[in-house]
Each structure stands twice: as C-alpha cells, then as structure tokens.
Image (cartoon, grey):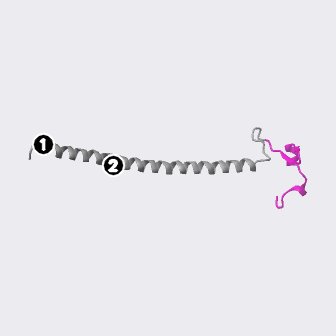
Amino acid sequence: MSIKTRIIALSLMGNLGIAGVFFALSSYQNHQQEQSSVESSAILYGQAWRTVLNDTFTSSLGPVQLQTGSLRMRFSGLILPPMMILNRPSHYRVAGG
C-alpha cells in the first residue's frame, strides 16, 4: 500500500469519525432541547394552575381584608364592622351552627 493510499484512507476515516461525532452531538442536542421544552411546558402549565388557584382563593376571601386581617361583610355597599358580624341575630345563622 502506497503512502498516498494510506494518507487518503486515514483522511477518509478521520472525516468519517468527525462526522460521527458531529452526528452524535447533534442528536444529543436535539434530545436535550426536546426534554427542556417538555419541562418548560410542564412548569408553565403548573404556574398557570397556581395562578388560577390563587385568584380563586383570593376572590373567595371577599369578606376578609387581607392587609388588616379584619373580617368585614359588604351588603349592597354597606360595610359592617366586625362586631356586628359576630353578634348577628340567630335567624341569620347557618342551620346547625
């Protein structure tokens, strides 16, 4: 085998090796990108659910003043102080309470 043939064979094998490494790294990068996008979608989906749950919880706390912690009920624009809410007549109480 002549030197020229050996050089050509070695350069072809080297190029094939480099192409194999590039192919392996490209497929690894694609796999990592897919995995990252799935994780990102799952995180975004979870954040959306937490936002909905927090908004629902906040809207259900209508009678509670979040900054002061006091309990106030609104009846057609009238704000009742906490003592009137706690000392309401018995016919306003919930059955069994």
Q: Can you identify the residue that label 2 sits on? A: 24
Residue 86 percent across, percent down from the top left:
85, 48
Q: Which region of the structure is painted magenta?
A: 70-97
Between marks 2 and 1, how big is the CA–CA gap?
30 Å
Residue at image coords 20%, 43%: 11
In this image, 65 relative to 17: left or right? Answer: right
Residue type pointed to by label 1: Lys
Residue 25, position as x, y percentages in the image = 35, 46
* SS assignment at label 2: helix
The residue lying at 33 percent from left, 48 percent from top is: 23
Q: Name the residue under label 1.
A: 4
Q: In this view, does 46 lie above or below 7?
A: below
Asked if the magenta segment contains residue 35, the reply would be no
Query: Which one is in front in this view, the residue at disc 2 or the one at disc 1?
Result: 1
Q: In this view, does 93 lie to the left or right of 25?
A: right
Q: In the rendering, at what x and y percent does residue 66 appear?
A: 75, 41
Q: Are marks 2 and 1 in contact (CB under 8 Å)?
A: no
Residue type, label 2: Ala
In this view, which residue lies farthest toward the bottom? 96
Give me the residue at 12% from left, 42% from top. Answer: 4
Horizontal side of 16 relative to 57 (left or right) equals left
